[in-house]
Image (tube, grey):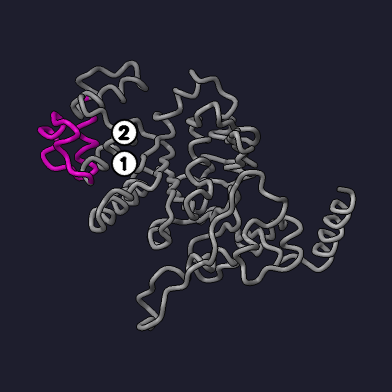
Amino acid sequence: MSLKPNAKVVLEVKDLRTHFRTDAGIVKAVDGVSFTLHEGETLGIVGESGSGKSVTNLSIMRLIPSPPGKVVGGEALFEGVDILQLSEKQMREIRGNKISMIFQDPMTSLNPFLKISTQMVETIRLHEKDVSKEEALKRSIEMLKLVGIPSAEKRIQSYPHQFSGGMRQRVMIAMALSCNAQVLVADEPTTALDVTIQAQILELINNLSSKMGTAVILITHDLGVVAGMCDQVCVMYAGRIVEKAGTDDLYARPSHPYTEGLIKSVPRMDTKQKGNRLFSIEGQPPNVIDLPPCCPFHPRCNKAMDVCRSAYPPVKDLGSGHEVACWLYADEAAKKAALAEAQTKEKAE
């Protein structure tokens, strides 16, 4: 459900599954993820390290190293076309052109031996064959000005090491949007930056999204960032989305115990917490190799029931596009049926 009236769907992910084959077993890094992204919307994907956030988006971009990784199921519909089924040549027409990605560390994404002008011009001309070098350079300078780089005409002739971390990230955003991308995937775009620069970069992404109508997928572990940036949020745990809602709705009524724990663990300015310790979720994220067919959060959950240890919960629609996968919201008949089925399987084994 879009929070932007009449906004068209630009990306629809259905039951995405990505596995990695290792000597220890199959790692189900992404295990049935579904979401919808609308034009001009910012979708936040949050969760602890290892929850599957980055792998989800690398799968969509077709950047999973194979082997050992492989997308084993699902669809990613961009403009109605399943991009997971395209050839590599067809995918290159979309990657960087219509769907762009910003990574955590801009220094590893920029070639240290080439000037910014060379890299930006090559990016534009790679995706638009009929654009001349002069036109591409002019557009590159305009994009650098758009992302707030001063003296863009001079700075474009600099090398990456001559820019600060925040300025390099601005260059990456300019490159990502230089081909008028419809979707921008930002994977922890402020991790390597100090707090004041983080705020500037996030505000820049937000403003550009509003101005250009670009849809944004923001991958982060910072719920404070999500509150200020996102229209909708997907909370991931152990390769699955455990809760999905509009941002205001999620903060007003977090429904999954994991989401509650994440929100409680963030310091708040509007409550008296002097002398109180911050809340922390006990335990560690599960080993995602051969996960049992039950709720993976139950060992860390203070509301766990017998059924949580027996079967994975169904997704419950709480209204207004708010969905949660938790046995707390299932009816008694469903709980009894799941327990009975688990007991039958256990006896058979």
Is the magenta region chiefly helix, strand or loop?
A: helix
Label 1: how many Cα within 10 Å (few below 14, some 14–19, many 20+): some
Report the residue marked by disc 1: 105
Residue 78 falls in image quadrant: top right
Q: How many labels does the image show?
A: 2
Q: Which residue is drawn at 58% across and 31% down?
A: 70
Under circle 1, the secondary element is loop
Camera-side residue: 201 or 78?
A: 201
Residue 84 x, y percent position in the rendering: 57, 29
Residue 25 x, y percent position in the rendering: 64, 38
320 falls in the magenta region:
no
Q: Which residue is drawn at 49% across and 40% down?
A: 57
142 falls in the magenta region:
yes
Camera-side residue: 295 or 35?
A: 295
Residue 216 x, y percent position in the rendering: 42, 45
Q: Residue at x 42, y 58 (%)?
A: 226
Q: Residue at x 27, y 31 (%)?
A: 110
Residue 194 to residue 331: above or below = above
Camera-side residue: 1 or 241?
A: 241
Segment tinted magenta in the rendering: 137-165
Which residue type carries mark 2?
Ser
Residue 109 has which mark?
A: 2
Residue 58 has which mark?
A: none
Residue 38 x, y percent position in the rendering: 50, 46
* Callout 2 touching callout 1 (CB < 8 Å): yes
Residue 94 to residue 149: above or below = above
Residue 244 falls in image quadrant: bottom right
Give the farthest residue toward the front. Answer: 23
Under circle 2, the secondary element is helix
